[in-house]
Image (tube, rainbow, N blue to C red):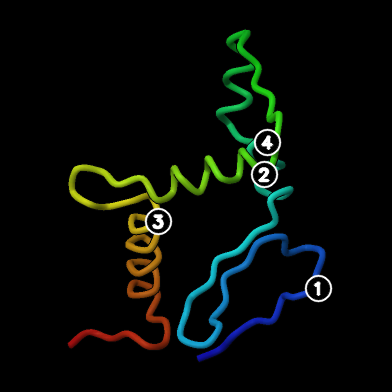
Amino acid sequence: MSTTNTKGCARFESEAEIVGDMLIIALRISTLAHAARQSEHFFQCAEQGKPLKITNEAVFAQSVANALNREAEDGSTPITRMLDKATEWVSEQGEDGIEEA
């Protein structure tokens, strides 16, 4: 298994890494807010005359965390759907740790 250490690197404001027996996906709250402000949704709302403004980055981050944990009727969440896509990519690219049985 290869890992990339991006700690302290200004270019990487978000990262996924293995810590012990956990996959940790982390990003700074300020990075989350910046990404939201640069998102297509923010631009579309502004174009429609309904501009958005993040009034509290920490509260906004909690709202995003709640949204990421929101279950659909089938029990999936945005996180499980993201992991499904990542697993598919790893499999299709022939990455390490997975193979056809």
Nearer to us: label 3 or label 4: 3
Above or below, comparing residue 53 to residue 39 in the picture: above
How much space separates mark 2 and mark 4, taking CA atoms? 18 Å
- Label drawn at residue 58: 2
Q: Earlier in the sequence, mark 1 or mark 4?
A: 1
Q: Residue at x 34, y 59 (%)?
A: 80
Q: Residue at x 27, y 52 (%)?
A: 76
Q: Residue at x 33, y 75 (%)?
A: 91
- Direction from residue 32 to residue 79 in the image, left or right: left
The reply to whether the C-beta atoms of the residues labelled 1 and 4 are less than 8 Å apart is: no
Q: Earlier in the sequence, mark 2 or mark 4?
A: 4
- Direction from residue 76 to residue 67 in the image, left or right: right
- Label drawn at residue 38: 4
How much space separates mark 1 and mark 4, taking CA atoms? 23 Å
Q: Nearer the viewer, residue 33 or 56?
A: 56
Q: Amino acid at mark 4?
A: Gln
* Residue found at the far top of this picture: 49
Above or below, comparing residue 21 to residue 86 in the picture: below
- Label drawn at residue 8: 1
Q: Secondary structure at mark 2?
A: helix
- Label drawn at residue 79: 3
